[in-house]
Amino acid sequence: GAGVSQSPRYKVAKRGQDVALRCDPISGHVSLFWYQQALGQGPEFLTYFQNEAQLDKSGLPSDRFFAERPEGSVSTLKIQRTQQEDSAVYLCASSTLKGGADTQYFGPGTRLTVL
Amino acid sequence: QKEVEQNSGPLSVPEGAIASLNCTYSDRGSQSFFWYRQYSGKSPELIMFIYSNGDKEDGRFTAQLNKASQYVSLLIRDSQPSDSATYLCAATRGGGGADGLTFGKGTHLIIQP
């Protein structure tokens, strides 16, 4: 079946611009996660949704970052007034919620470059 | 502060040998542990998960967990050039379906033909 998809794959923004990154999870997956991966680093957790509810946003680095999943499927990560330090790959992952060690499946990521 | 530590490498291993990748974690509440492989420019893909102390084998891969020592490892037997990648260790307090993963920085593995 189809995996997690993300768009756009690449985004170049001028400092101060707003950007919106989209994630389409695997059909039927209840859980959706956003991560930020800087060059040479491991992914860092940003936020978690269970269906449409945002249950954890402890990893969002500032109030410029906002995520939503209004119908419990597609999610959008929005970054307002982008800064150079926001340059990174933004990864979306989805998972079932059966209990035990549910696997998070990652999308291809959106590479954001802020000039 | 939840931390997962890995040696960034590069770790160079001859083809056909055993590659040993190690990881330590600081959060004693961590229950589930995952090894992901990430090729350059690609997204992470799951290799194995483990949540019980001891060894877990899957083909050429063996994950080992020691909760008392807060230590996780991944062994790759009969290493192949296609195993060359960055290996990410991740931990979570829950099962992974309802908790964000805490990742290490990854170990860059090079398999020499």
Image: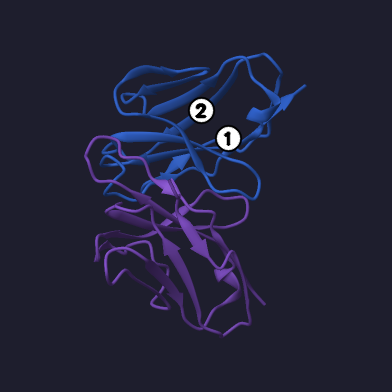
What residue is disc 2 on? B22
Amino acid type for the residue under numbered disc 1: Asn
Read off the chain for label 2: B
Chain letter matching colour blue: B
Residue A70 at x, y percent in the picture: 28, 72
Cα separation, mark 1 vs mark 2, equals 7 Å
Q: Is residue A89 left or right of residue B34?
A: right
Q: Residues within 10 Å of mark 1 (few under 14, many from 20)?
A: some
Q: Looking at the rendering, which quadrant does residue B24 occupy?
A: top left
Tags 1 and 2 touching, CB below 8 Å: yes
Q: Looking at the rendering, which quadrant does residue B33 occupy?
A: top left
Q: Is residue A50 above or below residue B14?
A: below
Q: Which colour denotes chain A?
A: purple
Disc 1 is placed on an element classified as loop
Q: Is residue A93 left or right of residue A73?
A: right
Q: Residue at x 25, y 42 (%)?
A: B94
Which residue in the rendered view is the most extreme toward the front?
A: A1
**Residue nearest the observer in this picture, B56 or A27:** A27
Residue A83 at x, y percent in the picture: 56, 77
